[in-house]
Structures are given as structure tokens and as C-alpha cells.
Amino acid sequence: RGVATSTSAANASLRRHLSAVVDHVAALLPTTKAAILQQVDIVRATLETLLALVSASGDGDGGATSSGASGGGISDRNRLHAQSLEYFTVEKLVHSTRSLTALLQLLEVKDYYIRYRVLQLLVVLYANQSERLLKSVVHDCPMGIARIMSLLRDGRDLIRNH
């Protein structure tokens, strides 16, 4: 009983810390096109960090997918914990109008790397919280649909087809 209490307390503490990390990372995203263009390296690193947070279990693009039963894989317990943290991070991003608006604003930039990473993030968010993401994009983010639709006009096949 004492172990369960300390484990839940540790999980609560970790979630508070992760919430603060997600808030700080999302706050690094500039909200104007001029600021984005001046801070391309910071934006790229921020997007990589957010992708890492939502792909912690290794089941995302390019991640390891080995089961915990074979050597070299992560244990089922660790995988479950990582998936729980991923879900929490996705939930935090989807429920943050500021974060979603900043991500959608990044789609205005024609930088391949930025557009592709934002698209990857949106795919993960949609896969985990589709109803809430759609509601947020339609109701809370002006021009959100137009920015997403602009991806279909992108001349690069990888972005357009993803």
C-alpha cells in the first residue's frame, strides 16, 4: 500500500513537471512570421523536443518498436509509462489554444523542415485526440483550417502526401 502511494505521488510529481516542460517548450514557439524566420534554429529544436515528448515510447516515426519480451527492447511497464506520458503531453498540447495556434502559425513558413515537423506533430495529435483537435482548430484557431489546407498546395510530395 505504501509503494502504491509513493508511486502515485511520483507520477503526480512527474506530470506536474512534464506539464511545466510542455508549457515552457510551447512558449518558445514564436507567433509572428518575422519572429519565426529570425529564430529558425530555435523553432526546429522546439519542434524536435515536442515530437520527442509525444513519441517517448518509440512507436512514432522512426522509433524502435521492439516488444519488451526480446532483448534490447524496453519493458512492458516502461512502455506503458512512456505511453501514459505521451498521452498526457498530447492532451496538454491539444487543450492549449496558444500551443495549437503557434503550431498552425508555423505552417505559414515555407521552410521544409518546420512544415514537415509541424505536420508530424499534428498527425500524432490527431491520432490521439482527434475530436478535441478538430474542435480546437475549428473554434479556437482562426485560419487553422486554411493553414492545414495550404499543405495540400505544397509542391513537396512528402509534405503534401503525409
Image (spheres, rainbow, N blue to C red):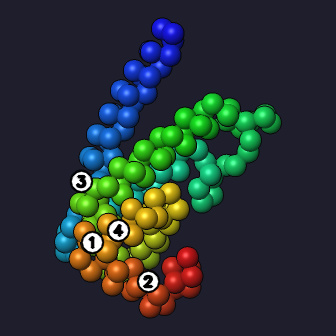
| Mark sitting earlier along the chain (4/2) | 4
Identify the residue position indicated by label 2 in the image.
Answer: 151
**Numbered disc 1: secondary structure:** helix
Residue 103 position in % (x across, y down):
33, 66
Question: What residue would you read off at disc 4?
Answer: 135
Distance Cα–Cα, label 4 vs label 2: 19 Å
Q: Can residue 49 be seen in this view?
A: no
Asked whether the residues under the numbered discs 3 and 4 touch, taking CB atoms below 8 Å apart as contact, a structural biologist would say no
- Read off the residue under disc 1: 139
From this view, report whether residue 70 is shown above or below residue 25. above
Q: Nearer the viewer, residue 139 or 100?
A: 139
Estimate the x, y position of residue 51 in percent, counting from the top left: 46, 55
Please tell me whether mark 4 or mark 2 is closer to you in this view: 4
Report which quarter residue 118 is drawn in: bottom left
Residue furthest to the right: 70
Position of residue 96 measured from the top left corner of the image (x, y, whole percent): 28, 56
Mark 2: amino acid: Leu
Question: Tags 1 and 4 in contact by the CB under 8 Å rule?
Answer: yes
The residue to which callout 3 is attached is 27
Could you tell me the amino acid type at mark 1? His
Q: Residue at position x 48%, y 8% from top? A: 2
Q: Is the residue 11 above or below the residue 99 in the image?
A: above
| Gap between marks 1 and 4 measured at Cα | 6 Å
How far apart, in angstroms, are the residues tagged by discs 3 and 1? 21 Å
Picture residue at 73% right of the left edge, 36% below the top: 68
Q: What is the tally of numbered marks visible in this picture?
A: 4
Q: Earlier in the sequence, mark 3 or mark 2?
A: 3
**Cβ–Cβ below 8 Å for labels 3 and 2?**
no
The mark lying in front, picked from 3 and 1, is 1
Circle nearer the N terminus (1, 2): 1
- Tell me which amino acid carries mark 4: Lys
